[in-house]
Amino acid sequence: MSQEYASVWDAIEKDAVKAANLKLRSQLMMEVSEYVKQSGLTQSQAAEKLGTTQPRLNDVLKGRIEKCTVDRLVNMLAAVGCKVKLSVSHAA
């Protein structure tokens, strides 16, 4: 019998609070990655615009989620003019 999950994070992390944090961080990481891809900048150039270091940006681009915090990712996106919106829904 197989079990279905809402996301890969729900399958990996049994703690719902931790899974929610992982989902948020992964979404933000994808946005940063998309910015870098669309910008055509080198990692060093993109890191400077994002207000971080090239090694930190590389962590994001390589998917090293354990190295990324929500704060840092939001700050990176804000530094390049992105507006991050949060939507909260209550469980039924």
Image (spheres, rainbow, N blue to C red):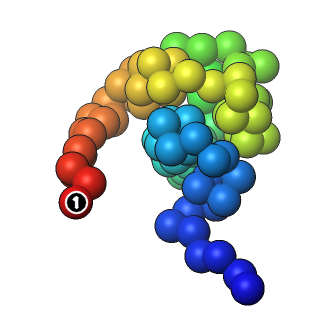
In depth, the one of 67 and 49 nearer the eye is: 67
User: To which quarter of the image does residue 22 belong?
Assistant: top right
In depth, the one of 33 and 63 nearer the eye is: 63
Residue 27 position within the rendered picture, expressed as x and y whole percent measured from the top left: 50, 47
Q: Residue at x 51, y 67 (%)?
A: 6
The residue that disc 1 covers is 92
Give SS at disc 1.
loop
In depth, the one of 88 and 11 nearer the eye is: 11
User: What amino acid type is highlighted by mark number 1?
Assistant: Ala
Q: Residue at x 62, y 53 (%)?
A: 9
Residue 13 position within the rendered picture, expressed as x and y whole percent measured from the top left: 66, 46
Residue 56 position within the rendered picture, expressed as x and y whole percent measured from the top left: 71, 20
Q: Residue at x 56, y 63 (%)?
A: 7
Which quadrant holds the C terminus? Answer: bottom left
Q: Along the horizontal axis of the image, is 55 left or right of 30?
A: right
Which quadrant holds the N terminus? Answer: bottom right
Can residue 28 be seen here? The reply is no
Q: Residue at x 48, y 36 (%)?
A: 17
Q: Along the horizontal axis of the image, is 54 left or right of 8?
A: right
Can residue 24 be seen here? The reply is yes
Give the residue at the far front of this rendering: 1
Q: Across the whole image, how many numbered discs are drawn on residues?
A: 1
Give the residue at the far bottom of this rendering: 1
